Amino acid sequence: MKADQVLTAHHDVLRGLLRELAETTDDQVADRRRLRDRLLRELEVHTQIEDELFYPAVRDVSPLLSVAHAEHRQIDEQLATVMRTPVDDPEFVTEVRMLSSTLHHHTFEEEQRMFPQAHALGEERLEELGRQLQGRQEELGRSGAMRLIVRLKRMTLKLV
Amino acid sequence: MSVRSRLEGVLGAVERWDLLDAPGYQVEHGVALTYLLAGRYARPLQDLLHGVWLGHPLHPALVTVPVGAWTAALVLDGLDATGRGGPGTGPAARAVVGVGVAGAVASAATGFTDWQHAHDGARRVGLVHAGLNSAALALYGWSFADRGRGRAVRARVTAATGLALTLASSWLGGALSYRHGLGTDHADRSPEPRRFTPVLGQADLVEGEPVGVDVAGVPVVLVARDGEVHAVGGTCPHQGAPLGEGWLHRGELVCPWHGSRFDLATGEPAQGPSTAPLPCFETRVSGGQVEVRRRAHWRSPTATTTAEEASR
């Protein structure tokens, strides 16, 4: 798979999780907690593979890196708000919808604008980058250190 | 070669110096982490430091404190060194150095808060600006301590070096404002359209979903909400983001880039980093078409349209 296809597939996972989360009701506390924690993990992996591999690779062909970076910041901040909101709070879904809007805009920006620009790298390079992204994504998914970071982040965000 | 073209060369070199990006992102991650740890207080604190309450960035106003205090210290040090100052001059110089250090710490907090959202060349220039200022702050901290220990000569030398660094750094700070437009108002303040102009079929508006349109070259965002059609400027005053790509949260329009939030009725920023309000437009529906007209800046959002104005 090419880099843009790998990332779009992962965007689909993130969008799917947010859709599921937004459809839960206030009494589905366990489901909310499970989906939210999965979302936190997937977002952490996604941000990291983009920051580490994809953005440095496209810096010469896309002028949108700063914008994409700003959008990651906004997603991160809203994720913190979602983590702070108790899962049985009536405001929970409102904050999840805000996170969903933020993420949808970011994925739109990448899929509609940045990925077409990335094609200037050539098909071969995109295939190679895709393999790297996939490898790193699987590695981070298995990584104990990543799991520890996510757990620490979850605990800290709930405390503050 | 003129002074200006030399300075221009320095500025260009800093703007293109992409080795600064890696440390720049590290510093930004540090700022982000600090605010994440501030939890629910992060937003009000950032709005305070951006100057959302003030209407323009707080940083340039606050930096006058260290620059003024440290300039006064230079004068007092000069008087003291030449024996023309009288007995209170040394302690007075130490006091103003201290005031400057406190002001510089506060200025740094506002500066990092504004800088975290800077893009590309401005981000690099801002990082060098911050680095030089931090070095100056360290020198003045050292100078302050030396004054307490009676190391008067070394204290004067470090202070004078600190002032030179501060002035060099101020030049870069000026470039950030006047060249990169960081902190300036990026909204389109055109007085057009002066007359009601049709922009979109009412049927094309979906409740609660912002739509970006172009009215005689002026970007406008339309939002249908609770039976009303709101229209505000389509360019974020903060850094020019397309607000037509934004969304609503708790009834406020959210900027897709840095998350500023705007009141739809008044255009006021409900949340930073934007410190300036959005331009507002009056709307009416005529023959199934939404029409907009620029609201005069002096007219309050609730003012009624006079018969004479409505007839235009």
Image (cartoon, rainbow, N blue to C red):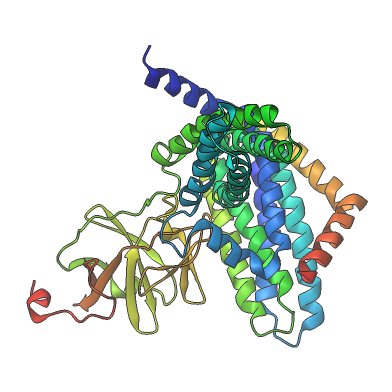
Query: From this viewpoint, which residue is outermost toward the bottom?
Result: A27
Q: Which of A5 and B169 is in front in this view?
A: B169
**Residue appearing at x 66%, y 41% in the figure:** B25
Q: In which quarter of the image is the C terminus of chain B?
A: bottom left
Residue that appears at 52% across and 57% down: B50
Residue furthest right in the image: A144
Residue B227 x/y as whole percent: 35, 84
Question: From the viewer's perspective, is residue A68 above or below residue A16?
Answer: above
Residue B280 placement: quadrant: bottom left
Where is residue A81? Give x, y as percent: 67, 69
Note whether A26 is above or below B24 in the view shown.
below
Q: Tell me: A45 left or right of B239.
A: right
- Report the front residue among B295 and A7: B295
**Residue drawn at (54%, 62%) of the image:** B48
Judged left or right of residue B227, residue A133 is right
Residue A120 seen in the current view: no
Left or right of B141? Residue B287 is left
Asked if one can make out residue A46 in the rendered structure from this viewpoint, the answer is yes
Furthest toward the top, the residue is B1
Q: Position of residue B102 (x, y in %)?
A: 62, 50
- Residue B285 as seen in the image, left or right of residue A35: left
Q: What count of labels does the image hold?
A: 0
Q: In which quarter of the image is residue B210?
A: bottom left
Closer-to-camera residue (B93/B211)? B93
Q: Quadrant of the N terminus of chain B?
A: top left
Residue A121 drawn at (x, y percent): 60, 30
